[in-house]
Amino acid sequence: MGSPMRTSLVWLLLMATPFPAQAVDLSRHRWQHRPLLVFAPDAGHPAYARLEQALAGQRAQLGDRDMRIYRIVDQRVSLEGEPLDDSARTWRQRMGVAAGAFTVILVGKDGGVKLRGGSDTTLGGIFRLIDGMPMRRRQMQQDS
């Protein structure tokens, strides 16, 4: 256990740290959606542009897989294109994504991270991964 002075310093730092009103919380998606978190340093990043192009026109495919797309680009955070008041820095810290890195994280309906990829991540690969998941396979059988 730390000294009283060290403990006080830790509490002081925690209290002085600004937290956004809406902290990173994906629990509302549990058992309902598969959040896809796309982190990019800016909208002009080549991997981000490729993924955005792949996502265009895939609304039905994304919907079939119960996916929700979070974009954490530069200092902005959005869900399905709607801006959120969340801090991009908080999202990066919480998800362990370095500033300036392009990272794609797929979260399963159970809340666990199913994929953590970089610039070589493709939408087709994400779809194949999801389609191999037991919940998705049951859904596809029921839809047939």
Image (cartoon, grey):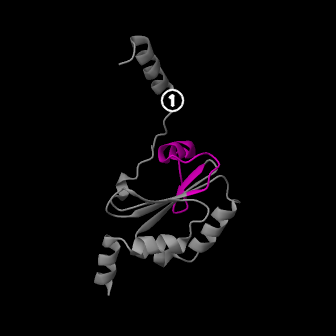
**x, y percent for residue 80:** 51, 63
At a point 37% along the width and 56% down the height, the residue shown is 112
Q: Is residue 114 magenta?
A: no
Dot 1 crowding, Cα within 10 Å, few <14, some 14–19, many 20+: few
Q: Quadrant of the N terminus?
A: top left
Mark 1 highlights which residue? 17
Which residues, given as a range, are shown in magenta? 76-103
**Coordinates of residue 126 in the picture (x, y in percent):** 49, 70
Q: Which residue, as the protein is rendered here, is positioned at the far bottom?
A: 144
- How many numbered discs sit on the rendered protein? 1
The answer to whether residue 1 is above or below residue 56 is above
Residue 79 visible somewhere in the drawing: yes
Q: Which residue is pictured at 55% across the width and 62% down the height?
A: 81
| Picture residue at 45% right of the left edge, 43% below the top | 23
Please state the horizontal and vertical placement of residue 141, each as a whole percent of the image.
Answer: 30, 83
Position of the C terminus, as image quadrant, is bottom left
User: Compared to 63, does 112 lie above or below?
Assistant: above
- Locate residue 78: give its quadrant: bottom right
Residue at the image point whose x is 46% and y is 64% from the top: 68
User: Is residue 93 in the magenta section?
Assistant: yes
